[in-house]
Amino acid sequence: MDVLMMSDDKIFDKPAIVPLEDDRTINGAILYIENVPILEHLIDETMKSMDRTLRWGETGPLLLTRILFEQMNPSGFTDMAVFYPIPHYDIYKVLLPEFRDECAEACRDAITIHLFNNAIVRMGYWKDMAPPIGSFLHEKLGEGDLLRYFDETYPVQVMRNMLDNFRLRMSGQALGIKSIVREFVPSLMRTYRHYHPKQN
């Protein structure tokens, strides 16, 4: 579950589908390019990265953004509202009922919505469970008769707690007492040895 079709009756008449994920990034989850020299250049650049340790996105969004901004006219790129109406840092909102209306408004003119699978998995989302009733994503899955593919539905409070825990982990505020002690005790000992060195 990474890309969800929002509408199949909207007209898209550009020769290439190069959607912006935000003001300055191209994501390859939804992409169509006919230009053979550009495609060959992308392949060549990807092949140069073989057998190397890569950062996440180095042969994906980072490469696409660099090459396509160099080789194409950005006026031909598609605004994020069409294919990426909800940015990756707000994707959690599709999972909570309190953001249903905000998400619906953001997706009003969208053809697809990218659910940023990697981000949702990192939040701890179990894919065999549907999002909470009342959430924007639950509503859209229901409209497409897709809820039958899920075993259960997340209770809304469980989803809120899961997302709160994720935010705490990302901010570092979730450090438990054991983690703090593991860091504090060695630091304290180093400080003591620094100010009270052994006498020979």
Image (cartoon, helix red, strand yellow):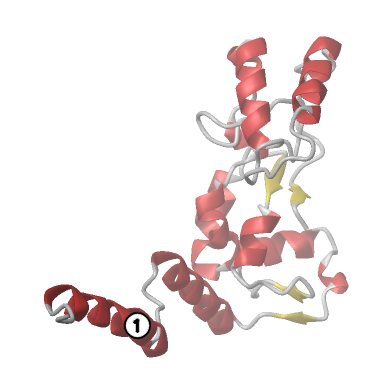
In the picture provided, is 157 more to the left or to the right than 114?
left
Q: Dot 1 corresponds to which residue? A: 180
Q: x, y percentage for residue 199?
A: 14, 81
From the viewer's perspective, is residue 100 above or below residue 49?
Answer: below
Q: x, y percentage for residue 38?
A: 78, 15
From the viewer's perspective, is residue 105 above or below residue 185?
Answer: above
Residue lying at 67% horizontally and 11% vertically, measured from the top left: 71
Residue lying at 82% horizontally and 19% vertically, measured from the top left: 39
Can residue 149 be seen at all in this image of the molecule?
A: yes
Q: x, y percentage for residue 190?
A: 25, 76
Residue lying at 46% horizontally and 71% vertically, measured from the top left: 169
Residue 91: image quadrant is: bottom right
Residue at the front extreme? Answer: 200
Q: Amino acid at mark 1?
A: Ile
Q: Which quadrant holds the C terminus?
A: bottom left
| Within-10-Å neighbours for mark 1: few <14, some 14–19, many 20+ | few
Residue 58: image quadrant is: top right
Residue lying at 23% horizontally and 81% vertically, measured from the top left: 188
Q: x, y percentage for residue 177?
A: 36, 89
